[in-house]
Image (cartoon, rainbow, N blue to C red):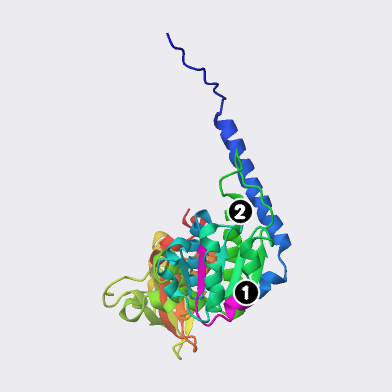
Amino acid sequence: MSTQPQIEVFPFDEFEQLREAGEIIRQEAQALLEVSRSLDGAFSTAVGQIVDCAGAVVVTGMGKAGLIGRKIVATLQSTGTRSMFLHPAEAVHGDLGCLRTGDVVLALSNSGETEELCRLLPIIRRFGIALIAVTARESSTLAAAADVVIRLGQLAEAGQFGLAPTTSTTAMLALGDALALVASRARGFTRTEFATFHPAGMLGRQLQAVGDVMRQGEQLRIACETATIREAFVGRTQPGRRTGAVMLVDAEGRLSGLYTDSDLVRLLETRRESHLDRPISEVMTLAPKCIAATAPLAEAVALLSQHRISELPVIDGLHRPVGLIDITDVIALMPDERLE
């Protein structure tokens, strides 16, 4: 009768899992600190080449480094730098046709000896294209061929065996982010340009201008400050989205106050119906918080949250009301504490 070899099982309970996970994250965080402290003039030179690039920043890398490279491309593109990814293995089967004079190549390889990547180096040099290398050693084949070398240093990979690319790829990603964002700032990339590249989703909505979202025209309630409360609220039915506030204006049409549905409810709850025929200026909120139509929507959300208000008048350059932001229009963008 054959006997099966006994397999020794080591306990790996939840406590040990959390302990090891924490250690992996700490190790990677420490590596990032070390890389940040080792930055030198080579980084600034690389930023200058990216800013001055007349073509595209072509990022290349094999395996895990290649996956990091694709993310760096996405960051470069979203922050105003024309960029593309070139797979080293596909490059020698026709994809080299994407390279043009004026491009800059950003090559990622921890060892600097990746076969597929090293095969491209003579071709890149022949094309006369600037090469930025992100690698561990300045003595590697990649570093020797590069115009600029951003050195990672000898980083120990995380985990039980220290073999899988972890710490090194985390460092590459952070360096890629740093290159993209510093180059973006050096180029004078604006918030408006960023919004242009991010029109969709929650981020895109936050970057919209107030004027793109505000209630306006017939959706607004605007009354003279000399009107009574009853006159300010009684009138034609408002089409579309109904605003929860009346914006009061002076004789020149400038915003002078605000009176909300909540103010009216409080008046009725305290049985002060007689006040309905008194001037609304006696009870309106004087000099209410307001915002310009050109301001970013995120600024309006911040005002609503900070002052715990539900309506925000939008004014033009002469302080005349042209719109209104209601909290229900931006509820998804509000911080959680404002919604409690």
**Residue 208 at least partly seen:** no
Quarter occupied by residue 244: bottom left
Q: Which residue is drawn at 58% across and 59% down?
A: 109
Residue denoted by label 1: 47
Q: Say whether residue 181 is left or right of residue 250.
A: right
Q: Which of 16 and 288 is in front in this view?
A: 16
State the SS at label 2. Answer: helix
Q: How crowded is mark 2: few (under 14 residues within 10 Å), some or many (20 or more)?
A: many
The alpha-carbon separation of the residues under discs 1 and 2 comes to 21 Å
Q: Residue 73 at x, y = what percent?
A: 49, 67
| Location of the N terminus (image quadrant) | top left
Q: Is residue 333 above or below residue 318?
A: above
Few, some or many residues within 10 Å of mark 1 (<14, 14–19, 20+): many
Q: What element carries label 1?
A: helix
**Residue 199 forms part of the magenta stretch:** no
Q: Left or right: where does residue 246 sit relative to residue 168?
A: left
For disc 2, the marked residue is: 168
Residue 240 rendering spot, x and y as whole percentages: 28, 72
Residue 207: image location, x then y, percent: 46, 72
| Residue at position x 40%, y 79% in the image | 323
The magenta segment: 48-61
- Quick check: 154 left or right of 271? right
**Could you say where residue 169 lies in the image, as x and y percent from the top left?**
57, 55
Count the labels in the image.
Answer: 2
Classify 155 as above or below 301: above
The residue sitting at the top extreme is 1
**Which amino acid, mark 2?**
Ser
Give whichever of 234, 38 is nearer the camera: 38
Q: Which of marks 1 and 2 is nearer the N terminus?
A: 1
